[in-house]
Structure formats: structure tokens, C-alpha cells
């Protein structure tokens, strides 16, 4: 089983490639935002998390797999992960950011990724007016 918090996983790379192909530019693992989001699009004030279905309890067949050993332990671990995910999303929202999730089982699904890109683009931050330059000389 994959561990939580690994960087540059294959699913994450797939999402990054897709965003890049569609002309979206991002930064990675931004420590200045709550929870150090995997993928950050500053122009859209959007953070993207690529979640493993088992680890984050996705409502899909991968997410509903029962661990053979210690199922109780894993259940509480996954519940804690979900709680942490929700906390991060709230913390980002308080700063005016959106947190979007892509599930591991969806990273090859163009329809899902297109919908994601639509949501990102709607978050586009309007360019602020150019600040007045102080008069010099
Ligand atoms: Zn899933």
C-alpha cells in the first residue's frame, strides 16, 4: 500500500501533465498554504489534491476495499485522513482559496479532468488594477 504524503506520485504526475497541456501553470508543494497542497494555481487561488482512493476513503471500489489485517485500525486511520482533508479545505477557504480533489481512480478520465479544469478557470482571479506609481523626480 502506498503511504500518505508521498510526493510526485504517478497519479499526481498525470494530473500535472493534463493541466500543463491545457495551458494551466502551477506550483508544487507550496508550504506557505495550509497543509502544503500538492498542486497550486496562484492565478486561480486554487489548490489541487490528488487523493489515493483507499487512503482518503473514496466512494469507489478501491476506496471500499477492506484491509485484511487490522480493519479497525485502517478505518480510523482513513477517518483521520478525511478529517484532515476537510480541515485543510476549510483553512484554504478562509484564505479565499478553493481546494479541489482529484481521486486516483479518475486521473485518466478526460471527462473528470475537463470538469476540473472548468472549475479551476471559474476561479480565475481578476488582475488587479495596476498600482499607481509614485511620482518620481
Ligand atoms: Zn476512487
Image (tube, grey):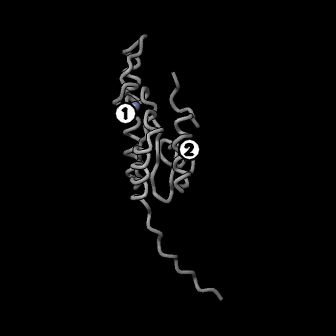
Quick check: which quadrant has ligand 1? top left
35 or 50: nearer the viewer? 50
Answer whether labels 1 and 2 touch (C-beta < 8 Å): no
Q: Which residue is mark 2?
A: 29
Task: Determine the residue positioned at 49% across, 60% down.
Answer: 43
Is residue 134 found left or right of 97 in the rendered image? right
Residue found at the very far front of the displayed protein:
110
Is residue 59 found left or right of 23 in the rendered image? left
Question: What label does residue 83 carry, if any?
Answer: 1
Residue 54 placement: quadrant: top left
Task: Determine the residue positioned at 51% across, 21% down.
Answer: 1
Q: Position of residue 81 (x, y in %)?
A: 41, 30
Task: Determine the residue positioned at 57% across, 50% down.
Answer: 27
Task: Determine the residue positioned at 58% across, 37% down.
Answer: 8
Question: What label does residue 52 carry, if any?
Answer: none
Between marks 1 and 2 in the image, the one whose residue lies nearer the viewer = 2
Is residue 10 found left or right of 124 in the rendered image? right
Above or below, comparing residue 125 to residue 131 in the picture: above
Total marks shown come to 2
Cβ of disc 1 within 8 Å of ligand 1? Answer: no
Above or below, comparing residue 63 to residue 116 in the picture: above
Q: Position of residue 15 (x, y in %)?
A: 51, 43
Residue found at the very far left of the displayed protein:
59
Amino acid at each position: 500500500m502506498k503511504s500518505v504524503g508521498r510526493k510526485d506520485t504517478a497519479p499526481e504526475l498525470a494530473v500535472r501533465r493534463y493541466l500543463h497541456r491545457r495551458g494551466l501553470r502551477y506550483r508544487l508543494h507550496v508550504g506557505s498554504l495550509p497543509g502544503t497542497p500538492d498542486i497550486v494555481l496562484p492565478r486561480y487561488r486554487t489548490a489541487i489534491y490528488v487523493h489515493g482512493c483507499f487512503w482518503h476513503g473514496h466512494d469507489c471500489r478501491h476506496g471500499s476495499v477492506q484491509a485484511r489485517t487490522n480493519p479497525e485500525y485502517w478505518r480510523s486511520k482513513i477517518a483521520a485522513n478525511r478529517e484532515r482533508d476537510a480541515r485543510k479545505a476549510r483553512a484554504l477557504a478562509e484564505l479565499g482559496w478553493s481546494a479541489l480533489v482529484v481521486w486516483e481512480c479518475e486521473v485518466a478520465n478526460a471527462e473528470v479532468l475537463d470538469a476540473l479544469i472548468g472549475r479551476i478557470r471559474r476561479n480565475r482571479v481578476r488582475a488587479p488594477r495596476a498600482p499607481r506609481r509614485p511620482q518620481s523626480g
